Image: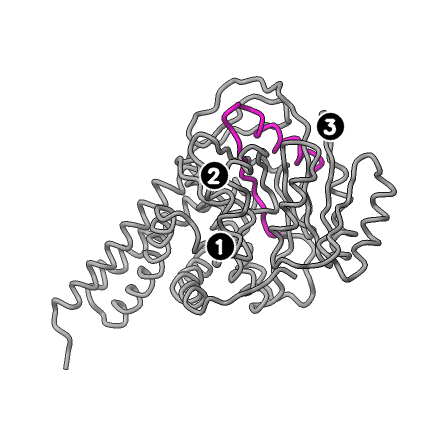
């Protein structure tokens, strides 16, 4: 029995509504990164620092303060050997330290750290946690914050590599550009360089795409005055804000979220800045398989359940509108209902994504992903429509190392 005309009209209306939400998001929100100039410093003494709700101003930053780089590691001997030299090579005119918290490692991590410390005794310190009694790395990071010499913190991970020796300088400059700034969101892209031979091309490419997509989202919303998350591989903040929100106490029961939940609890339009200078990027390797990628997403999504309600509602609206758009497109095309309208709306959204996200990918220094948008954007819809609900309903628990 054929379905009544009113049913298909209702689906067409929902499809059009989903497209409208998507167009507003791309042009009105994401466009704040892709379509509006972002003035960033080219060195740490440059002008034009910008917070999320202010236009850039000709402010000469002179308040360069001492900074502690914090890095938590558990069983990371190989990554530390490979990436610590780039962290220790940072060039910064004020005092700074690298404090590595060894979270009860059971491999050669202590030996590797001892070797680096002997070569850099005035720059590097190691805090060793003898026994692993807390899941995740919140306890390790809290211990590191407590032991740090200075009151400005810059976070990264053991498997990450700064893009340049000026990473610290750029992030610290943004953090001290204006007295009200307490958080700086940096970018942590997936590496395009050396690939693991066992890595799937599709997994690697989609991981890069999804990282850029999510970054475009949280940078754009931060610039719109609604910061909601940051990534721990490239995040700067002041000790005062960590103390003010009670550290990780409000979400200590959640294994993940040492980065985004801290931002979610404390960031606002006035106290948050973004740093998109390419020299300030911090690269990490993409997952090598779909199971590895899924474990990573499980950790991230678990933290998202503790976001503030306005953020959860907005993110749900963005995700559902994208998933619903593609689902309803497929249903309407298979049914052959109003094909001219359905295809026209589809092409309007596709060209909008190609244009706006293409601009964003240039800002994020990954324009090579542009031509893959028609393939990877539907995969993002599958992610929002299938993976996210499955993880949230299943409440999978994934630890850290």
Q: Position of residue 117 (x, y in %)?
A: 83, 43
Q: Is residue 321 left or right of residue 282?
A: left
Q: Quadrant of residue 18?
A: bottom left
Residue 202 seen from this side: no
Residue placed most toward the observer, 229 or 42 = 229
Q: How is the image coloured?
A: one colour
- How far separated are the C-alphas under marks 2 and 1? 15 Å
Asked whether disc 2 touches disc 1, contact meaning CB atoms under 8 Å apart, the reply is: no
- Label 3: which secondary element: loop
The image quarter containing residue 365 is top right
Read off the residue under disc 2.
266
**Quarter-wise, where is residue 288 in the image?**
bottom right
Residue under the point 63% across and 31% down: 151
* 58 versus 148 height, above or below: above
Residue 348 point in image, percent of width and height: 31, 51
Task: Work out how far the residue at label 2 is from the one at label 3, CA to CA, in angstroms.
Answer: 26 Å
Q: Which residue is mark 1?
A: 303
Q: Which residue is mark 3?
A: 95
Where residue 257 sits: x, y (%)?
Answer: 53, 51
Q: Nearer the viewer, residue 385 or 361?
A: 385
Q: Residue at x 55, y 37 (%)?
A: 243
Residue at disc 2, secondary structure = helix
Q: Earlier in the sequence, mark 3 or mark 1?
A: 3
Residues in magenta, as a range: 164-190
């Amino acid at each position: 029995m054929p379905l009544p005309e009113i049913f298909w009209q209702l689906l067409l209306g929902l499809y059009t509504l989903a497209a409208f939400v998507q167009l507003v998001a791309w042009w009105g929100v994401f466009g704040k990164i892709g379509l509006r100039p972002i003035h960033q410093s080219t060195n740490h003494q440059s002008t034009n620092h910008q917070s999320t709700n202010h236009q850039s101003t000709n402010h000469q930053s002179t308040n360069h303060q001492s900074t502690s780089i914090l890095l938590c590691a558990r069983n990371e001997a190989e990554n530390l050997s490979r990436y610590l030299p780039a962290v220790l090579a940072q060039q910064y005119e004020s005092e700074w330290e690298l404090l590595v918290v060894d979270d009860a490692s059971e491999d050669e991590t202590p030996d590797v750290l001892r070797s680096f410390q002997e070569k850099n005794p005035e720059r590097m310190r190691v805090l060793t946690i003898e026994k692993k009694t807390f899941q995740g790395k919140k306890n390790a990071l809290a211990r590191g914050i407590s032991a740090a010499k200075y009151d400005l913190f810059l976070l990264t991970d053991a498997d990450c590599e700064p893009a340049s020796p000026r990473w610290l300088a750029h992030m610290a400059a943004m953090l001290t550009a204006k007295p009200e700034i307490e958080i700086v969101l940096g970018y942590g892209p997936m590496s395009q360089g050396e690939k693991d031979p066992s890595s799937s091309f599709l997994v690697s490419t989609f991981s890069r795409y999804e990282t850029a997509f999510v970054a475009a989202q949280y940078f754009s919303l931060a610039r719109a005055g609604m910061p909601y998350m940051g990534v721990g591989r490239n995040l700067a903040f002041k000790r005062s804000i960590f103390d003010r929100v009670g550290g990780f106490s409000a979400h200590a029961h959640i294994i993940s979220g040492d980065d985004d939940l801290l931002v979610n609890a404390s960031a606002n339009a006035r106290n948050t800045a973004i740093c998109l200078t390419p020299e300030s990027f911090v690269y990490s390797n993409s997952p090598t398989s779909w199971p590895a990628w899924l474990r990573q997403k499980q950790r991230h999504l678990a933290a998202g359940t503790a976001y503030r309600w306005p953020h959860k509602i907005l993110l749900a609206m963005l995700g559902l509108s994208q998933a619903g758009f593609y689902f309803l497109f497929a249903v309407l095309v298979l049914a052959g209902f109003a094909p001219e309208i359905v295809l026209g709306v589809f092409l309007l959204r596709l060209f909008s994504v190609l244009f706006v996200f293409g601009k964003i990918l240039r800002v994020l220094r990954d324009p090579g992903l542009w031509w893959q948008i028609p393939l990877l954007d539907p995969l993002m819809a599958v992610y929002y429509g299938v993976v996210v609900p499955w993880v949230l309903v299943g409440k999978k628990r994934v630890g850290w190392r």
